[in-house]
Image (cartoon, helix red, strand yellow):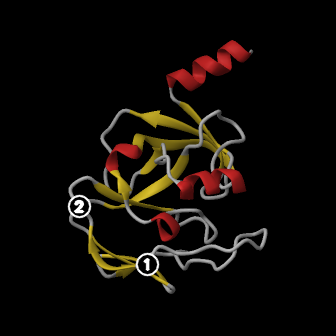
Amino acid sequence: MLLMFCGAIAAGLRINGTHSFPIGLYWVIGKQPEKGDLVFVNPPATALFSMAKERGYLNIGFSPTSHLIKRLVGVPGDRVTIDSAGVEVNGVRLANSAPLAKDGAGRALQFYPVQNYILGPNEVLLMSEYSPASFDARYFGPVQATTIESVLIPIVTWK
């Protein structure tokens, strides 16, 4: 059974155990990431992502890695504002994007403030429209496009 499970992961099965998107099974599809795609992301090794892992924000329950599942909402050339009201891409405020002052355990959160920032040639913006409590770009800002490992589609999900 364990061998079959490992084989399924090697073939493209991904398991989401966070609330940024519905908990469930997702499948890697072979396409280049485009704006609007759901993506599987390997976050950079920074102090902020170490803190996120320690606090349990990342997908560590089902994987030895700390990957994220996010929506690709900003691509090179897009204009981004992140403020106390939320995240805006090209003048459009994103749903469920207002940053929280504290997480569900009452620990302080700090949003990533930028105004009219133009994403560079290798930068992307990753968000969740699904959850107003998602750990996403409102807290970590733009990331390198190379952090995106693949594009995903949901197979079976539940709330």
N-terminal of the two: label 2 or label 1?
Answer: 1
The C terminus lies in quadrant: bottom right
Look at the picture and state if 143 lies above or below 63: below
Look at the picture and state if 147 lies above or below 29: below
- Residue that mark 2 sits on: 120
- Residue that mark 1 sits on: 113
Image position, residue 144 (x, y; %):
34, 51
- As helix, strand or loop, the secondary structure at mark 2 comes to loop
In the image: residue 116, left or right of residue 58: left
Q: Badge 1, how many Cα within 10 Å: few under 14, some, many 20+?
A: some
Discs 2, 1 touching: Cβ within 8 Å: no
Foreground: 90 or 80? 80
Look at the picture and state if 92 lies above or below 126: below
Q: Amino acid at mark 2?
A: Gly
Q: Residue at coordinates 55% horizontally, 43% vertically from top-left?
A: 67
State the mark number for residue 136. Answer: none
> In which quarter of the view is residue 117 placed?
bottom left
Q: Is residue 48 visible?
A: yes
